[in-house]
Image (cartoon, grey):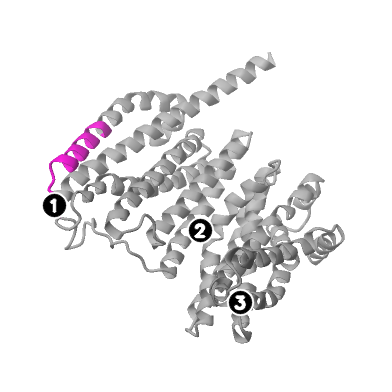
Amino acid sequence: MIALLQRDLILAVRAGGGFGLGMAFFLIVIILVPLGIGPDMVILSKVSIGVLWVGALLACVLSLDRIFSLDYDDGTLELLLTSPIPLEAVVTVKAFSHWITTGLPLVIISPILGLLLGLQGGDLKWVFISLLLGTPALSVIGAFGAALTVGIRRGGLLLSLLVLPLYVPTLIFGANAASKGLADISNGSALLILTAVTLAAFSILPFASALVLRINLR
Amino acid sequence: MSLWEYANPVKFLKLSDKLLPFFTGFSIIGLAIGLFWGFFFTPDDYRQGSTVKIIYLHVPSALMAINAWFMMLAASVIWLVRRHHVSALAAKAAAPVGLTMTMVALVTGALWGQPMWGTWWAWDPRLTSFLILFLFYLGYMALWSSIDNPDTAADLTSMLCIVGSVFAVLSRYAVNFWNQGLHQGASLSLDKEENVADVFYQPLLFSIFGFVFLFLTLVLIGTRTEIRLRRAEALRLRKDRE
């Protein structure tokens, strides 16, 4: 499993495109929003949490089809199906490596981008924490969507149509936790539910994704 | 003699052939009584005026929008467990009907909200969850139409329906958490003291009855069409092989 993780990470870095692109897209979204709304820092800091979360969501969705499609096309996925590791574990590892290559960089640069949107020192902490707890769920939910559409040519748009509604709970709890933290209201419950969504998604969804992959590889 | 016998497409077609006139009749009778009574023979509400009559379209369509998804969920589980094709096709046929019901509920709700709340749209929990439900229907139908192999499509959409249901319920609670809304609480419950007044309640029951049978009729027709399409496809393939 560790070998598989290493392989996925190395492929993501060396094949190019996957690793930095999500981050660059996130940056562009955050730059475009003030251009659309106007340079008023007060308004910007009000919408900042939502913009950061939605930007992270979209950056994540764009890279989802890479989770399975390359391995599906060259037959690696079929080899993995016959390997001693259960397919459920393969899915988990792949979702996790997607998070490391896409989600984690987004989380790390989010405080810097928060500064651009007028957030102050202590507030950045909540953006960072909520994204850190929430983005793994985005990867694993996205892996389910990627598994569904792996056999479809040009399934990119379909994939986002399927996955984005599934992101609603994560987005609501994540953004809610961050904005409550900003307003100095106790946000423990929102953070706990956000973590629960992430953990539940990681423990249950790989089974569904593996089932779907088996159907697609039939 | 069990219910599963009707999972056989031929028997299903025979049975639905007999049931369809009754279902159509029930839905016409229910809708006619409910809507005519509701629109012309109930008093105006003392605060809402005649706009209260939108209830006869709004509530039943919203009810069926949710129940159509539950029906799809049940049919999807039956397909995954027992592999009855009729079940998968019924789920497929129910999706457009559910989508339409969701749209009717949203549009009538907007028409009702404008004079009453002073706005066409508000980010109220129920309105938001219906919009999300609308997206779920769209995704489900898009997945059906983009896969060629019918069995694979049925499997994948069933899985999407099951996972989607979990997330739809989760979204419902998340949205409640996110915003308190304008919508009134439940006012048609059987076990509560204070409900909608009887003058409005009785025609509404007929209207709901009509909508239930309208839904059943449309789903039956849709399923029969799908079965025949499948049969035509099979015949075509057999002819190509010869």
- Res B67 visible: no
Q: Position of residue A82 (x, y in %)?
A: 77, 50
Q: Earlier in the sequence, mark 2 or mark 1?
A: 2
Q: Callout 2: residue from which chain?
A: B
Q: Say which of marks 2 and 1 sits in front.
A: 1
Q: Are marks 2 and 3 on the same chain?
A: no
Range of the magenta residues?
Answer: B27-45
On screen, residue B190 versus residue A4, left or right, reads left
Residue B35 forms part of the magenta stretch: yes
Tell me which corner region of the image, top left, top right, bottom left or bottom right, holds residue B185. Answer: bottom left
Q: Position of residue B80 (x, y in %)?
A: 54, 44
Residue where numbered disc 3 is placed: A127
Which of the pair B45/B148 is nearer the observer?
B45
The reply to the same-chain question for discs 2 and 1 is: yes
Does the CB distance between marks 2 and 3 fall below 8 Å?
Answer: no
Question: Is any part of residue B39 visible from this angle?
Answer: yes
Secondary structure of the residue carrying numbered label 3: helix
In the picture, the quarter occupied by the C terminus of chain B is: top right
Q: Residues within 10 Å of mark 2 (few under 14, many from 20)?
A: many
Rendered position, A91 above or below B98: below
Magenta-colored segment: predominant secondary structure:
helix
In the rendered view, does A142 fall on the left or right side of B43? right
- Residue, disc 2: B167
Residue designated by label 1: B198
> In 3D space, how far apart are the residues under numbered discs 2 and 3 (Cα atoms)?
24 Å
Label 3 environment density (alpha carbons within 10 Å; few <14, some 14–19, many ≥20): many
* Image quarter hosting the N terminus of chain B: top left
Residue at 45% across / 44% down in the picture?
A: B72
Marks 2 and 1 close (CB-CB < 8 Å)? no
